[in-house]
Amino acid sequence: MKCPNCKLENPPTALTCDCGFFFGNDSQRASAYRVAVPATVAPDRFPIRALGTVMIILGMIICLFFILIYEPSVPAVDAGKRIFNSGLLQNQQNGLIFGLGISILGALILLYGKE
């Protein structure tokens, strides 16, 4: 096929000439110049599964604090004796429940969260 613009001989299957002339109609021109743009996926700023992992670790730290460090007893009047304070025992129990709740919620987020 000979180009009417520059008179260069092109193969019969060519859509364009080296000079830029387009062989074909307008619909073929639009499809020939259409460029496939890859779809971009917006990255997560903070993956939800990482949040679940952080919550599990935080819940474990809270539980360990209330088991190992928190002291629910107070010194008694007698020398060397300690008695348990019911209010402090309740605070320890609430701290353990809170820590376990955070850990369980983090485990659920880790299991069922999107990647």
Image (spheres, rainbow, N blue to C red):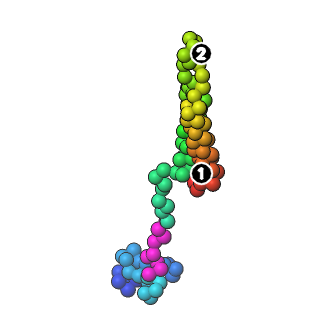
Left or right, residue 48 beside residue 104? left
Foreground: 43 or 18? Answer: 43
At a point 54% along the width and 19% down the height, the residue shown is 75
Category of crowding for the residue at label 2, using alpha-carbon neighbours closer than 10 angstroms: few (below 14), some (14–19), many (at least 20)? few
Pointer 1 local density, CA inside 10 Å: few below 14, some 14–19, many at least 20? some
Q: Residue at x 37, y 77 (%)?
A: 20
Q: Quadrant of residue 99?
A: top right
The kind of secondary structure element at disc 2 is loop
Whole-percent x and y of residue 10? 46, 78
Q: Nearer the viewer, residue 15 or 50?
A: 50
Residue 73 picture location, percent across and down: 57, 24
Work out which residue is located at the far front of the displayed protein and give it: 77
Q: CA distance from mark 1 to mark 2?
A: 45 Å
Mark identifier at residue 109:
1
Task: Give the residues in magenta.
Answer: 30-38
Kindly identify the amino acid type of the residue bearing the numbered disc 1.
Ile
Name the N-terminal-most of marks 1 and 2.
Answer: 2
Residue at image position (57%, 42%) is 98
Image spot of residue 38 (x, y percent): 49, 65
